[in-house]
Image: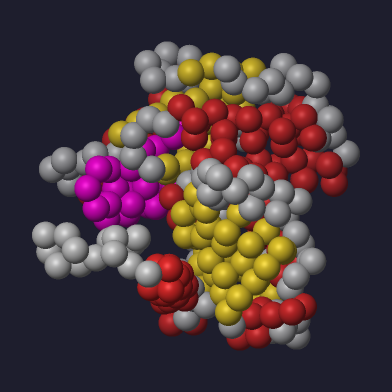
Amino acid sequence: MNSHGAARVGERQSPAETAQHWRLERDRHVAFAFAAADLLIEVGLDGMIIAASGAAHAVLGVDILDLVGRPVTDFVAASDRPFVRHLLKQVHGLYRIDPTVVHVVQADGVASRILFGGCRLPDRAGGVYLSVTLVPDSLTPIPQPRDEATGLLTADALRVAAQRLARGHDGVAPNLQLVQLDGLSGAARQLPADQSAMLLEEIGAALRASSVGGDAAGRLTDDAFGVVTKAGRDPDRDAALVADLADAICGAGIPEGEIGTQVARIDLALGGLSDRDVVRALTHAMNNFVKSRGARASTSRRYRTGSRPR
């Protein structure tokens, strides 16, 4: 017994008592998981479902046994499939998918929204553990103006989202990451229409996957974008985004080095600024970045798209 009167595992316990302890620990963790999710899914490196447990029929309209062996994106609405693929790609480097809203389609064609989160364990190579929770219809968000080509928020809608997230943070304020893809619009015009559309969709999905809540990224101009991200500078997260964008661009057949990527980051700590001053500050920062193409931003770091940052 320790000083608090609780026995540690293996301390004067029989093998049966130790086994019982670990069964209780396992059951406790399972209970915690299901307290926060309707459905738990394990997927492999290829995105195929390895195991699942929970209310599959209520969430996806299929029996639990019908999930195993199918791509997890089979159940995702077509418009969100690139987004989910980018989330699954990023989790292998960042170890976590923060809960974000994803649209799914049930077997009978009924569309619904889920809260989609996940993690990867360092000692379990390949496996990704996903939590899925139905979002009540009562929490349907107000539609936001969007850029049709990328699916991202418009510049004005991004300013609103940035202000809301900066005001509503708990603790350290988030950042606004500004991304310039020099030459993107010109390169996209040289592609066949379907290939160009796919490129812009993939870029939009990569930026969304890096944003807070999965829907705090916007298109400022043809070649400039903004993303509200977690607080603090995270070189791994920044590098993962740049590499993800590089993969999307190279996947469209654009030669390496044809599009240059520049990134700047702005702290969204608002202090005592009024809402009007916040809008002015965000507008100035975005416009200044676009006009200067990020070249003079002291926080910027230059990469060449098509090669991974070092």
Nearer to us in this view, 108 or 66 = 66
Query: For the view shown, which residue lies furthest in the right direction?
Result: 192
The residue located at (64%, 35%) in the rendering is 244
Nearer to us in this view, 125 or 193 = 125
Above or below: residue 107 compared with residue 245: below
User: Residue 6 is drawn in which quadrant?
Assistant: bottom left
Quarter of the figure that contains the N terminus = bottom left
Above or below: residue 202 compared with residue 27: above
The residue located at (14%, 67%) in the rendering is 5
**Residue 183 seen in the current view:** no
Q: Position of residue 224 (x, y in %)?
A: 55, 32
Above or below: residue 87 compared with residue 6: above
- Residue 17 left/right relative to 240: left
Looking at the picture, the colour scheme in use is: secondary structure
* Residue 173 is one of the magenta-drawn residues: yes
The residue located at (47%, 41%) in the rendering is 227
Nearer to us in this view, 134 or 248 = 134
Q: Position of residue 281 (x, y in %)?
A: 29, 35
Q: Position of residue 247 (x, y in %)?
A: 72, 33
**Residue 10 seen in the current view:** yes
* Residue 174 is one of the magenta-drawn residues: yes
- Residue 46 left/right relative to 242: right
- Residue stretch in magenta: 153-178
Q: Position of residue 90 (x, y in %)?
A: 59, 43
The residue located at (80%, 27%) in the rendering is 254
Quarter of the figure that contains the C terminus = top right
- Residue 47 left/right relative to 55: right
